[in-house]
Amino acid sequence: MSNIILRFTFMAVVDLDKPHAMQKINDYQQHIKPVDSEFNFKKDTSAILANHLFINQKRSKIWINSLWTSLNSGHDDDTAIEIGNKKVSWDWLIEHGATIIQTDRPRELLSYLKKKGLHK
């Protein structure tokens, strides 16, 4: 039998609207050390979003999906492009810790990030 080493990358998915979201994040950070964590939320008032720096200090990235309002409390691609309000959409996500943004508008988002000096 050969020695097989299995490696995997774990991405936690956390619903910030759930009562034990902070405990779940802390458990993941302590025991699994995820490369990134996807945050989903219908309300953008989570203390985790307001105080997100502890996650980056653990060398983990924050993934926020900008596709549908049900996952980001209305800070979505359509608000950025259709309405033209990037401050309420992509800027808000970045200000609240997003280091990875899932988008259906990659060309527009990359252009925007480059203009802001946030992408090479």
Image: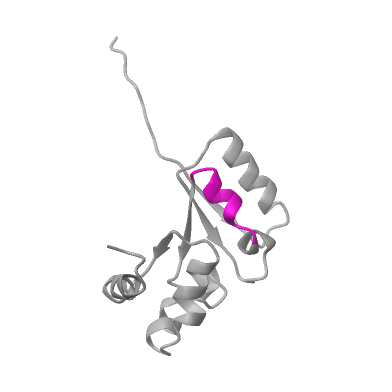
The answer to whether 59 is drawn above or below residue 19 in the figure is above
For the C terminus, the image quarter is: bottom left
Where residue 93 sits in the image (x, y, percent)? 50, 69
Q: Which residue is most to the right? A: 19
The answer to whether 36 is drawn above or below residue 112 in the figure is above
Left or right, 67 with reference to 46? left
Give the residue at x 41% y 64%: 101
For the N terminus, the image quarter is: top left
Where residue 110 sits in the image (x, y, percent)? 30, 70
Give the residue at x 37% y 69%: 103
Q: Which residues are magenta?
A: 51-59
Magenta span has 55? Answer: yes
Magenta span has 3? Answer: no
Give the residue at x 45% y 83%: 79
Give the residue at x 34% y 22%: 5
Which one is nearer the viewer's eye here, 65 or 55? 55
